[in-house]
């Protein structure tokens, strides 16, 4: 087959994937090399399929260079956790691994998964084995495959939660790579067949042109930001029963400064399927993308560009052709918000769930809030509790009868209750500096400080409790979904951000560039008069993002191709 492929026209990663022996690469040799804390260059691409990103501490970069030392390499490990649900025992295992093998913290991601940071090469294998010992894994958490499948987080908010959580797991299992490379490299399993006989029934030997993301939402809550996903399923409920899903396709928020043809795009609703058809629909849409995605240019390789290049009508026709039947017309639905709703809620089964705010998704102890310690104690003492990660970097202590015990523990360590502004409740920040190699600016380490200063302006105008979606990323790649925020910040350079306004509160509209390359003082100076105007002139129930469009501060971005960086 290789003779028929013109590699000169394809992106370099395509050949790396093809030559990787079904995702083995030379990872074993890289791990065994004692000379460097890094792995081989090609293996940095293959390791992503195993849930691993190579990084280095950028805070130490100049000093390491001065000492003529290689960068302080370490690795991010991302866990595959469909629907974000984990047990108390699994939480305790991840908590312990963070202390013994990583940097002592857990990161809750915007895809409802765990990340461990600061894992050095010699501890990589032991860490992954520890994760697998908890009946978790890191397979396909990154890479050019379907990644962690998101679903509505809170079981107390909908009787349909169990069914959509089951779908998330079914989709994740069905779209998993079938290669045994992961088990051989990390778990010391024997190779069961020659790789030339090994079959990837969905992905083939080249996998997808680019990453692929799936989410499942239950209206009125859009807590997975369904329109940011390559593929989405919106649960349709009639008379208390799940009758099926509206199918969305073509979302994706990655972007690149200076390249207008790389832009965020919201998914289109393309039809309706029954619950029994959902997994098949997902497979066929993945196959349409595998067969038609752009393998020559990774900045044009996501499904959103495949659709825009060929047209939505073409895409719908291809999906129906691959299925052998037509999707039904979409059913009505409505979303009210894309943020989490905090506090205790009682489910129909009489069990309680507490949605906790986790600033920046970082589980750690501070001088005033012993969050990591508190959650460890809850997991140790409240055995029936589930720990459910949300798509907004927060945590639900779910399905428990021991509400009072949870309250006592969290109060003892200063975790709950917290007095939070409506702005802070709706924040997301990506990791950015110091470990992400793509970041131009801070995000997680800086956004809380900036929010405190914006809160002062809000308080002056009686808006401290007004909910406003605010998000910050250190680069335009969109990991924190900033392009859906009512107030969005994209790092442009150290200490400077592009300011975007005009997303809405339910995640159904892209925002618009307002001002470029602003310092903190300039950000506050720009926001102050707009917030004052909002306080004085907003209409009943009008969100901040809707207001800035109505008043002409920015024009509505109606489709991704019109987005300005």
Image (tube, helix red, strand yellow):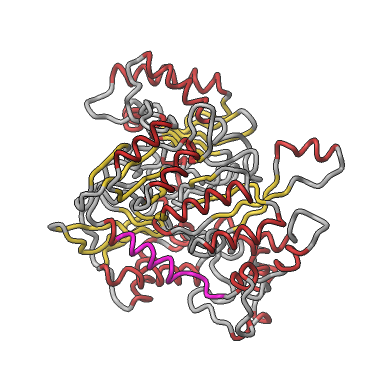
Q: Position of residue 334 (x, y in %)?
A: 24, 47
Q: Residue at x 38, y 13 (%)?
A: 460
Outermost residue, front direction? 381
Q: Is residue 428 magenta?
A: no
**Farthest-out residue, left:** 239
Q: Which residues are magenta?
A: 164-179
Can residue 110 be seen? Answer: yes
Q: Quadrant location of the N terminus?
A: bottom right
Looking at this view, is 512 or 536 the one in front? 536
Where does residue 493 sit, x and y in percent of width and height? 64, 33
Is 49 drawn above or below residue 563 in the view shown? below
Q: Residue at x 28, y 39 (%)?
A: 344
Number of residue marks: 0
Q: Main secondary structure of the magenta part?
A: helix
**Quarter of the image holding residue 423?**
top left
Whether 55 is drawn above or below 133: the answer is above
| Residue 539 image-quadrant placement | top left
In the image, is 91 to the left or to the right of 14? left
Q: In the displayed structure, does residue 473 sit left or right of residue 342?
A: right
Return the residue nearer the eye: 69 or 231: 69
The answer to whether 186 is drawn above or below residue 424 in the figure is below
Report if residue 564 is visible in the image.
no
The residue lying furthest to the top in this view is: 460
How far across and how far down the image is residue 312, in percent?
A: 38, 61
Percent position of residue 414, x then y: 43, 29
530 lies left or right of 341: right
């Amino acid at each position: 087959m290789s003779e028929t492929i013109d590699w000169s026209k394809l992106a370099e990663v395509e050949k790396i994937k093809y030559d990787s022996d079904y995702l083995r690469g030379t990872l074993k040799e890289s791990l065994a090399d004692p000379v460097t804390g890094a792995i081989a260059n090609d293996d940095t691409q293959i390791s992503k399929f195993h849930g691993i990103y190579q990084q280095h501490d950028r805070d130490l970069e100049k000093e390491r260079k001065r000492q003529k030392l290689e960068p302080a390499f370490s690795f991010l490990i991302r866990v595959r956790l469909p629907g974000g649900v984990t047990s108390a025992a699994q939480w305790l295992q991840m908590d312990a691994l963070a202390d013994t093998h990583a940097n002592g913290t857990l990161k809750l991601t915007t895809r409802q998964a765990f990340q461990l940071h600061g894992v050095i090469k010699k501890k990589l294998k032991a860490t992954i084995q520890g994760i697998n010992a908890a009946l978790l894994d890191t397979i396909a958490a990154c890479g050019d495959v379907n990644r962690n499948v998101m679903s509505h987080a809170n079981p107390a908010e909908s009787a349909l939660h169990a069914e959509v959580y089951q779908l998330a797991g079914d989709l994740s299992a069905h779209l998993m790579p079938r290669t045994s490379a992961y088990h051989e490299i990390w778990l010391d399993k024997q190779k069961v067949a020659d790789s030339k006989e090994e079959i990837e029934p969905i992905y083939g030997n080249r996998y997808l042109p680019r990453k692929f993301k799936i989410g499942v939402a239950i209206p009125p809550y859009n807590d997975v930001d369904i329109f940011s996903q390559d593929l989405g399923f919106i649960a349709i409920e009639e008379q208390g029963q799940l009758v099926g899903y509206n199918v969305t396709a073509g979302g994706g928020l990655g972007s690149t400064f200076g390249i207008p043809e790389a832009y965020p795009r919201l998914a289109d609703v393309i039809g309706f399927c029954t619950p029994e058809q959902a997994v098949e629909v997902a497979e066929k849409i993945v196959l349409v993308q595998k067969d038609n995605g752009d393998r020559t240019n990774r900045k044009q390789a996501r499904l959103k560009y495949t659709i825009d290049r060929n047209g939505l009508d073409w895409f719908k026709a291809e999906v129906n052709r691959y299925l052998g039947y037509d999707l039904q017309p979409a059913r009505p639905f409505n979303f009210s918000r894309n943020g989490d709703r905090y506090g205790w809620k009682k489910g129909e089964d009489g069990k309680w769930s507490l949605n906790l705010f986790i600033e920046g998704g970082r589980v750690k102890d501070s001088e005033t809030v012993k969050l990591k310690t508190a959650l460890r104690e809850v997991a140790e003492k409240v055995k029936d509790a589930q720990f459910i990660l949300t798509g907004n970097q927060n945590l639900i202590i779910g399905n428990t009868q021991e509400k009072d015990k949870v309250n006592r523990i969290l109060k003892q360590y200063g975790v709950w209750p917290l007095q939070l502004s409506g702005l802070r409740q709706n924040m997301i920040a990506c990791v950015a500096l110091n470990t992400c190699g793509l970041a131009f600016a801070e995000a997680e380490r800086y956004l809380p400080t900036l929010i405190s200063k914006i809160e002062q302006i809000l308080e002056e105008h009686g808006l401290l409790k007004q909910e406003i979606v605010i998000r910050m990323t250190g680069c335009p790649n969109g990991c924190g979904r900033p392009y859906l925020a009512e107030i969005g910040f994209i790092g442009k350079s150290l200490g400077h951000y592009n300011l975007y306004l005009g997303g809405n509160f339910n995640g159904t509209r892209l925002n618009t560039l307002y001002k470029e390359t602003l310092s903190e003082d300039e950000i506050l100076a720009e926001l102050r008069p707009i917030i004052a105007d909002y306080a004085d002139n907003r209409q009943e129930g009008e969100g901040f993002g809707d207001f800035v469009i109505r008043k002409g501060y920015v024009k509505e971005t109606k489709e991704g191709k019109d987005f300005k960086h």
